[in-house]
Amino acid sequence: MRLIEIEQNTWVQVTGVKGGRGLQEKLIQYGFFIGDRVRVLRRAPLGGPLLIEVSGREMALGRGVAEKIEVEFLP
Amino acid sequence: MRCALVGRPNCGKSTLFNQVAGYKAETGNFHGTTVTFTASKVRVMGTVLDLVDLPGAYTLSGASPAEREAQRYLDREPVDVIVGVLDASRLAQSLELGLELLQMDKPVVLALNMLDEAARLGLHIDGSGLAEKLGVPVLPLVASKGRGVRNLFVAALDAAKKGQSANHRYGLDLRTPQERHAAGAELAAAFSRQGERHLNWRDRLDDLILHPVWGYAVLLLILYIFFQTVYGLGSALETPLLAVFEAITGKVAAPFGEGSFWSQLVIGTMQGVTGGVAIVLPYLLPFLLGLGLLEDIGYLPRVAFLMDALMHRIGLHGKAIVPFILGYGCNVPAVMSTRTLEEPRDRFMAAALATLVPCAARLAVVFGLVAFYLGPIAALGLYAFNLFVIALTGRLLTRLMPEDTPGLILEIPPYRVPTLRNVFNKAWFRVREFVVEAWPALIAGSAVLAVLNFVNAARYIDLAVRPLTWVLGLPAEVGLPLIFGILRKELSLVMLGQALGTMDFGSALSTVQLFTYSVFVVFYVPCLATLMVLRRELGNKGMLWISGLTVVVALAAALVSRLVLSLVV
C-alpha cells in the first residue's frame, strides 16, 4: 500500500520509500524514518499535501512524496 | 572564547540568541528563518563570549544549504563550546541532533528548551538523569521567557574552560541517522514520562485553520484584516504627518527666497525626509508588526500547507510560499529565504517570482498613489492583478524549466503564543534597515533630483526614458522617478512629487496614468539591495536574467492595464 491510499486516522507502519536515495535521505533529515508509525491527519483539497503525524510531530507531505511511501497496516 | 548555538529548526535557538544578544537574529516559527549565521559579543560573568547562531539543522550530515552552512562552520571555525538547543516537547527528535553533537571532539552543553510547552503536553523530563547518561551538562531553559538563560551560559563557560573531550560520552558508536533515531527514541522513553495531556484551544485550532474550505476563508479573512488594518493605520497617520511636514518645509525654505537654488535644495531634501516619515513609515511599521505576529504564532507553515496545491500550478511547491510572503515585507529577505529550497531550479524560480511581489516600499507606492487617490478597492485590484501576473510568469517559466522535484516536505510546528518582545524587536530590526539604509538614500536622492531639476538635467534623463513612458502613455516627467526607483522603490513615489511639481498626484495624473505607473513600478527591476542579494544567491547571470525578465513583465503588465483601463474608465 502507498501512504496516499491510506484513510484518515489509521495508523500504519512505513516499510519503504521508492524514488531513489535522494528522497529517502531528505525524509530522514526531517525525522521521517522507515519503520516509523504514521497516520494521516488531514488532506488539503485540490490535490494538495497530506498532514501526517509521525513521532508526535506533524508534517506536511506533498502528494508526489506520499505516492512514493510504502506502508502496511499494523498487525 | 567562541560559543556556537546549534539546534533543529523551531527549537528556539534564535529566541535564545536574541535574549542574550539584543536583537540580531530574526526568529520565526518556521523552518529556515535563519538562513545564515549571526554573531554577537556577549558578556557572561566578566568574560566576553563570541556567540554564533547557526542555521537550524535537522542533522549535521544534511544536504540543505542551511544545514551545510552549520556543518561547515563547526568544522572550520575555532569553536570553544557548542550549545545544543533541544526542543523538550520533541525530545526524541532533538536528541538525534544532540547525539551527533556529542560525537564532535568539543565541549558540549545541552539546553532543554521549551519546557513550558513540554509541560503543556504532559511531559516530565529527567534532565539530571539524561545528563548523567550522556556525559554532558543538560540545562533547563524557557528561552522565550528568559528563564534559565544565565545558568546555561555559566555552564557553557565552565565547559569551555574545562575543555571536556568526547571520550566519556554516550553514543559514540552510533554512525547512521537510523541508529541515532533509534537511540533518541530509547533515551526519550527512558528519561521522560508522559503524564496527562492538556488539550486546549490550540490543539483544536487546526480543525478550522487547515479545513479544506474554512481554512481558505480564514486565510482570506486574515489577509483582509491585515491589509485593512495596515491601510487604516497608515492613512490615519499619513495625512496629518504630511500636513505637519509640509508646513515645516515652508518655514525652513522661506528665508532662502522663492525659486532660488538653496530654496529648491531645501525643499527637495525636506521632501525626502517627509517621504520617509509621512509616507513610508506609517505603512511599513504596522505591516511588519502584523507579519511578525503571523510568523511567531506559527501560521506561515499552515499557509504553506494550504497553498501547496496552488503553488504547484505555478511550478513550485508550498514551501516557496515563504519567499512570497516575506516578499510583501522586503524582497531582500525573500530572496535570501529561497536558500531553504533544495533544488537550484526551485531557488531560481522562487527568487524570480518573489522579486515580482510588491514589497513594503512598493506597498507605500501603491497605497500612496492607488489607494489614496483611487480607493482601497483599486489597490486590492492591483494586488490581485499582481498575483495573476506572477502566476502567469510562473507557468511560462515552468514551460522553460520543468518541475522535477517530488514535492513538499515540511514540518508543521505547534502554535505558540507570540512574545510581543520578539515581534516588536523583529519589526524594529527591519524598520531600522529602512531608516539607516534606505532613508538617507531617499533624502540624498531627493536633494540630487532637486539640483538636477534646477540645472534642467532632469530633462535629458526624461528624454532617454521617453520611449518607455510614451508607450505607457505617461508624462515625460515620470522618467526620472522611475530611474531613481531602481535605487529604492519608494523614490518612485517621493520623487514623483518633485518631478511633477506637486504632491497632489490626483490632479497631475489621470486615473489610467496613476494605475499604469503603479503597475510598472510594482514589476520593473528590483531595487539595488535586492539586485545585490540576487547576485549573491544566483550569480551575475541569474541576477541579469531576473532583471531582464522583470522589465519585460513590467512592460507587458503596464501595457495591458493601460489598454484595459482606457476602455473601462
Image (cartoon, coloured by chain):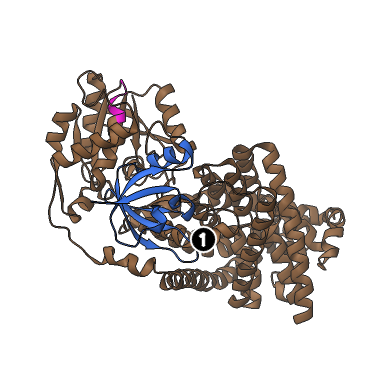
- Residue B556 lies, in percent from the top left, at 76, 62
User: Image quarter for residue B474?
Assistant: bottom right
Quadrant where the N terminus of chain B is found in the figure = top left
For the point 44% across and 55% down, the residue is B427
In the rendered structure, the answer to whether residue A50 lies left or right of residue B489 reads left
Find residue B459 and report its image quarter: bottom right
Give the magenta range. Answer: B100-105
Farthest bottom residue in view: B569
Q: Is residue B251 visible?
A: no
SS at circle 1: helix
Would residue B357 be found to the left or right of residue B458 on screen?
A: left
- Residue B245 placed where, x, y %? 59, 66
- Number of numbered discs on residues: 1
Q: Is residue B101 magenta?
A: yes
- Colour brown, chain: B
In the rendered image, which quarter contains the C terminus of chain B?
Answer: bottom right
| CA neighbours of label 1 inside 10 A, class few (<14), some (14 to 19), many (20+) | many
Residue named by callout 1: B309
Residue at point 46% right, 62% down? B306
The subunit carrying tag 1 is B
Q: Is residue B67 above or below residue B569?
A: above
Chain painted blue: A
Magenta-drawn stretch contains B108? no
Q: Nearer the viewer, residue B563 or B359?
A: B563
Q: Say which residue appears at 70% left-offset and 49% top-offset.
A: B400
Q: Is residue B294 visible?
A: yes
